[in-house]
Amino acid sequence: MEKRRLGKSDLYVTPIGLGCRTLHKVEAEKAVELVRKAVEMGINFIDTANIYGGGRSEEIVGEAIRDLRKRVILATKGSIVITNEGLPCQDLKPESVKKAVEDSLKRLQTDYIDLYQIHYPDPETPPEETVKTLMEFIESGIIRYVGVSNFSLKELERWSELIETPSIQIPYNFLQRRMYDRILDFCLSRQISIIAYTPLLMGLLTEKIRDKDFIHSGERAHIPSRILEECGKIVDKLGLMGERHGMTAAQLILNWLANQPGIGCVLVGTSSIKHVKENIEGVKWRMPSSVKKMVDDLVADIEVDLGDEFFTQKVKKVFSNYAGKTVAILEIGMKFIVPPDVKAGDTIKINWYGEYLGKCS
Ligand SMILES: NC(=O)c1ccc[n+]([C@@H]2O[C@H](COP(=O)([O-])OP(=O)(O)OC[C@H]3O[C@@H](n4cnc5c(N)ncnc54)[C@H](OP(=O)(O)O)[C@@H]3O)[C@@H](O)[C@H]2O)c1
């Protein structure tokens, strides 16, 4: 498979990567086999995180790539810790970063991480402090590059003033295109590669959309019905476009995303070796320009964006950070910058990009 340079780094990755967020849900031996097969079939970019499955995903990846380490560009993420109350919360203080990196190395059974990504920004810690600690890991060869994930354009601009950043991970699929649109120009101008995650919207942009049990289970249960309806329509249309070429809706989507400007890699999660093979074939396919035009038109006509949907969350605590901004700690754990009038006990609206959308009256 073709390899692409991530940013200005010397990491060359396949345009499709294996996302390991749900790997711990697969039976252990099969999960190890899945990762090995993906590498044998040509995928060289493996993405995990310290919090996936409470560390299990990293352990599985570590076990799977022990003998294949040099063939893999290994990416993991840190910044989320589990608090004493058992809740996930961002923590990029130097001592937390040190512990997170050391724990990841152990679980991954390796002495270096190719791409260590900041999973979510921590509005409480000055980025300079985090960067200083990460630079020490870079200098000692433990981390080769530091990437970011779920940063806003402003946060990315600030971060990339402090450290060479080869990549940013963002949600990017047919129903989540806003973040990509916002950061693309900056990424192109600074040679930062975009790594697209949830390209298949957790499986909803595949044939699985017709499976009622699947769409109403787990994290998908929170997706509003008008988004599900839109997914169904998109999959139907793509199914027809791909039919003549023996391509599925998922294959068309992955191919299209991988060939958008600025994209370094598209991360797909799967529990199935068959799907790994199909996804590789989908990305390797030379999409005829007539099909590309049809997909372009379909995408341009999609009016729904998951970014317009929101969760309501209760604010547990607010405080001023080092820059005088108000930070809210939510009852679910995570911290976000909010306007100064937000108080503890308020219920606020947060969208799928983690953006504050207002108070609930
Ligand atoms: N940075 C972040 O905050 C963040 C957040 C979310 C995700 N991510 C990364 O992005 C990766 C991918 O995201 P994701 O796993 O949430 O969602 P996804 O890749 O959009 O969707 C995964 C789903 O698609 C299905 N699927 C995969 N290939 C298929 C195919 N060819 N045909 C039909 N169904 C197919 C899988 O089912 P099967 O198991 O049946 O194949 C699974 O249900 C994650 O693993 C993680 O590495 C990062």
Image (spheres, helix red, strand yellow):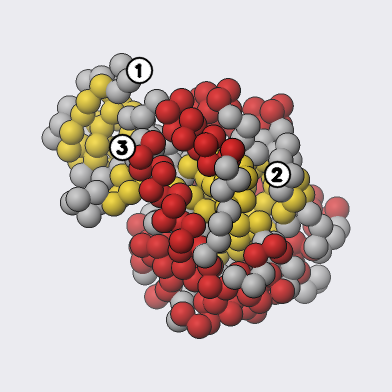
Please tell me how crowded label 1 is: few (under 14), some (14-19), or many (20+) other residues with Cα within 10 Å: few
Image mark for residue 335: 3
Task: Classify residue 288 as left or right of residue 203.
Answer: right
Mark toward the viewer: 1 or 3: 1
* Residue 82 position within the rendered picture, expressed as x and y whole percent measured from the top left: 29, 52
Is the CB atom of the residue marked by disc 3 within 8 angstroms of ligand 1's nearest atom? no
State which tag comes first along the sequence, 1 or 2.
Answer: 2
Please tell me how crowded label 2 is: few (under 14), some (14-19), or many (20+) other residues with Cα within 10 Å: many
Circle 2: residue type? Leu
Q: Secondary structure at mark 3?
A: strand
Image mark for residue 95: none
Above or below 211: residue 283: above
The outermost residue toward the left is 345
How many tags in the picture?
3
Please tell me how crowded label 3 is: few (under 14), some (14-19), or many (20+) other residues with Cα within 10 Å: many
Q: Which residue is mark 1?
A: 323
State which tag comes first along the sequence, 3 or 2.
Answer: 2
Is the CB atom of the residue marked by disc 1 within 8 angstroms of ligand 1's nearest atom? no
Image mark for residue 6: 2
Seen at 81% across and 57% down, the residue is 2
Circle 3: residue type? Lys
Residues at marks 1 and 2, CA–CA distance in whole angstroms: 31 Å
Above or below 328: residue 145: below
Task: Classify residue 195 as left or right of residue 123.
Answer: right
Seen at 65% across and 27% down, the residue is 186
